[in-house]
Amino acid sequence: MEEKAKKTLPRPKVFLLVFLLTFVLTMTLGFCSSLRVYEAAGSSMAPTLQDGDRVLFQMETSFQSGDVVILSSGGLGMVIKRVIAVEGQHVVVDYAANTITVDGLILDEPYVAEAMRDTQNPAMTLLDVTVPPGRVYVLGDNRNHSVDSRYEGLGCVHVSAVWGKALLRLSPRFGLLG
């Protein structure tokens, strides 16, 4: 009886295959280890997010206008807000015109469901501000029910307090965020 010769890969191909598998596994684990799930609390991000929505976010340190982020706000704990402006940008909240301008350009905000009401709240002082270095200006999508950068208690948030950028709404309604 003839023995069948075993087929083996040449050493360079085995090395390349092991290298590629290791690389893919390392990249996948690295990406997955930076992902977290957060449960939205309250109505400050409605209609984008509702109370109890579970959100997948990626731990991140770089943000741009329009990003939905999870941040630690001291007295408020962990909250979710939308980045309106980054360091060096000038923000103006105009209740009379129902607009937010950044560097003189009116933001198009289809995610905001109702007109802003001026509550004449004395703590709401940051309505015309240039964002300081290393900080971001954040607002809730539900402007009439959100404690955000307009309030001197929160103000422009230091980027070290921002945990990450929201990617997906997981449940109970699945969908992209941004």
Image (spheres, rainbow, N blue to C red):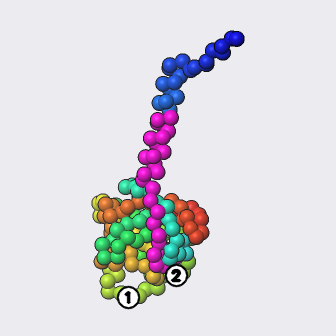
In the rendered structure, which segment of residues is drawn in magenta? 21-46
- Looking at the image, do the residues carrying marks 1 and 2 touch, with CB atoms under 8 Å apart? no
Mark 2, residue position: 115
> Would residue 137 be found to the left or right of residue 54 on screen?
left
Residue 123, position in %: x, y? 32, 83
Within 10 angstroms of label 2, few (less than 14), some, or many (20 or more) residues? some
At label 1, which amino acid type do we have? Gln
Q: Amino acid at mark 2?
A: Ala
Between 104 and 135, the residue placed more toward the observer is: 135
- Up-down relation of residue 63 to residue 95 (above or below): above
Q: In the displayed orientation, state which residue is furthest to the bottom.
A: 120
Question: Label 1 vs label 2: CA separation?
Answer: 15 Å
**Which residue, given by chain and number where applicable, does mark 1 sit on?**
120
Residue at point 59%, 65% (across, down): 174
Q: Is residue 37 visible?
A: yes
Say whether disc 1 or disc 2 marks the residue closer to the N-terminus.
2
Indicate the quadrant where residue 58 lies: bottom left
**Residue located at (45% from left, 66% from top):** 38
- Say left or right for 5 vs 44: right
Q: Quadrant of residue 158?
A: bottom left
